């Protein structure tokens, strides 16, 4: 499928997700490129958009290959298969996460100010990455 732009992609995605409309849901766009898509989905489904600020953790010597992400409050999601295949040590992953930890929190403060993060507890979550 070819889209005119990211907003067009979001409208097309929203059309396919109409069955979720009206429920307790939230739409996440965790990367800068995903935000326009997530915003269109949230608007079409009448759901609150929520910025899930994350920073990717690259593989040594292959920074475009992600071993996972670190988000606000130090929450991590790690792809164990990439770690195993790239032979990345737990020590390196811990160090990379520590180096990147401040960035998601800084971005969140810039975007949300003092407003709290939208709670995901008990909600259907649509994540556009």
Image (spheres, rainbow, N blue to C red):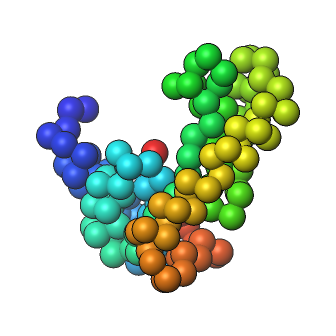
Indicate the position of residue 86 as horizontal and vertical percent values: 72, 17
Q: Is residue 61 above or below residue 124?
A: above
Residue 29 seen by the camera: yes
Residue shown at 35% from the left, 55% from the top? 35
Point out the image quarter for the N terminus: top left
Q: Who is closer to the viewer here, 93 or 20?
A: 93
Q: Is residue 123 above or below residue 40?
A: below
Quarter occupied by residue 56? top right
Q: Is residue 123 above or below residue 79?
A: below
Quarter occupied by residue 97? top right
Residue shown at 52% from the left, 25% from the top? 64
Numbered disc total: 0
Indicate the position of residue 77 as horizontal and vertical percent values: 69, 47
Residue 106 lies left or right of residue 96; in this view the side is: left
- Residue at the left extreme of this rendering: 4
Residue 52 seen by the camera: no
Residue shown at 83% from the left, 26% from the top? 89
Residue 10 lies left or right of residue 55; in this view the side is: left
Residue 94 lies left or right of residue 104; in this view the side is: right
């Amino acid at each position: 499928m070819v889209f005119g732009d990211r907003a067009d992609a979001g409208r097309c995605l929203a059309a396919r997700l109409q069955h979720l409309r009206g429920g307790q849901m939230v739409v996440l766009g965790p990367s800068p490129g995903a935000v326009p898509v997530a915003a269109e989905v949230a608007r079409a489904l009448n759901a609150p958009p929520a910025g899930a600020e994350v920073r990717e953790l690259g593989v040594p010597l292959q920074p475009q290959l992600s071993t996972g992400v670190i988000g606000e409050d130090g929450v991590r999601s790690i792809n164990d298969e990439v770690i195993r295949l790239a032979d990345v040590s737990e020590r390196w992953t811990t160090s990379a996460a520590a180096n990147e930890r401040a960035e998601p929190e800084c971005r969140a403060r810039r975007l949300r100010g003092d407003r709290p993060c939208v709670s995901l507890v008990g909600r259907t979550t649509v994540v556009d990455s």
